[in-house]
Amino acid sequence: MSDDEKRARFERLVLPHLDAAYSLATWLVRDDAQAEEAVQEACLRAFRYFDGLRGDEARPWLLGIVRNTCYTLLQRARQDGAPLPFDEEGCGEDAVAAGAVVSFPLNPEAAAIREADRESVRGALRALPVEFREAVVLREIHGFSYREIAAACEVPIGTVMSRIARGRRLLQHALGARAETKDTGT
Amino acid sequence: MNCPDAVRLMNAYVDEELDAASVLALEAHLRGCARCRARADSLHALRSGVQRHTEFRMAPTSLRDKVQARLGHLESVPAGATRRRVAMGAAALAVVALAAWTLRGTLEPAPANVARGTGKVVYHVSSSQNAGAALRTLRNHLEASPETKVVVVAHNEGVDFLLRGARDESGQLFATAVRQFKDRGVDFRVCNNTLVRRRIDGGGILPEATLVPSGIAEISRLQEREGYTYMRM
């Protein structure tokens, strides 16, 4: 394939997913400028490995690269001693395991979630550990199927299912708990 | 099916990722178990809350430009020229980058559809609150450039204004405006995934609107295959 053909094919297959790439990156690195960095870096990487793309799976393929680039960025930030860009405390796997099995929501929680405002919902999503956040974001905002999430994140479908379940469990807890706090305050 | 099994399958159930036999078994369990019904209800509430309060973020135009410029730069240097390029100074490199950028500009002039007033634009409506504003923008848009071909793709909560009987902030039926726009050649397309997920019957959609399998896929297709400019509402 000549360079021109490669570029044309790349622009046709991959660049239409630039919005999805940016959207995912903003949720993963949680900073618009860094998200732009990550997307640029990811596109250049994608172009380099473009010959490896088969068929029309460009979207999960590109988002997989975006995701890896974001993780590299996050890791680098951590090594540089910069503040951790995501809030891991209090919602790690142990907390999930404790909450996941013991307390199940009844309807009041559904009601609290329905009433949750934009800020609460976004805040709760931003606070999720990154691997749960990416699964939920890919599912809810990008409309990915489990299979596509598995492809993008390079994990088995079973892992996708458990990450989504845990992520949602944490969100339910955060939104239900928030509403309760609000109620006791009045 | 018992409760632990139901809980294990419930996320896949609300995501419509469950095989038909498991769906039947789970739904049978739900009919008899109020506690699991509440769990499913809570998950549905969460899904619609997350979808309502978050949005697919469009890449800034500047980012698209930067990516294309960097790609253009990568390719515009023929393999044989690499050795020569090493000897060039930084200033000369900048000239090469600029030349690549200009060249790309010549080969593929920016569509500038909206400015030219004869382009193709896809409006993406994904929130019910924004539907009224989207139609107002659309009206102004068509007044400024009547030749523009517009497709409105409704997705997530954005489908609400295309339901029969839906009214805007001032109590006017959306159907009236939708019919007028349709007469002016505007297409309304509704995401069927959204309908399935939200359990909305297709018959509840205004006759002016047509169903597409996936709103996001439709938007991608319009941008990718048909050269539509994207407008987020």
Image (cartoon, coloured by chain):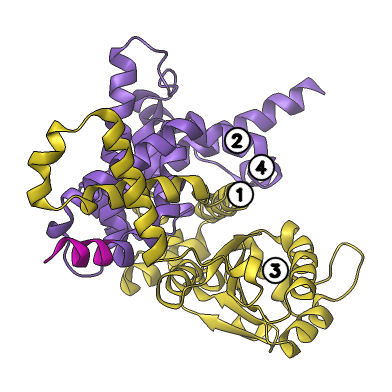
Chain colours: A purple, B yellow
Q: Which mark is residue A108?
A: 4
Q: Quadrant of the N terminus of chain A?
A: bottom left
Q: Mark 3 highlights which residue?
A: B160
Tell me the residue at 48%/66% (across/down). B216
Chain letter belonging to callout 2: A
Q: In the visual, does B155 lie left or right of A53?
A: right
Q: In the visual, does A67 lie left or right of B213?
A: left
**Marks 4 and 3, Cα distance to the nearest angstrom?**
25 Å
Q: Amino acid at mark 1?
A: Gly
Q: Nearer the viewer, mark 1 or mark 2?
A: 1
Which span of residues is magenta-colored? A1-10
Q: Are tags 3 and 2 found on a single chain? A: no
N-terminal label among 1 and 3: 1
Q: Does residue A120 show up magenta in the picture?
A: no
Q: Are tags 4 and 2 found on a single chain? A: yes
Q: Amino acid at mark 4?
A: Pro
Q: Nearer the viewer, residue B162 or A18?
A: A18
Q: Mark 2 highlights which residue?
A: A175
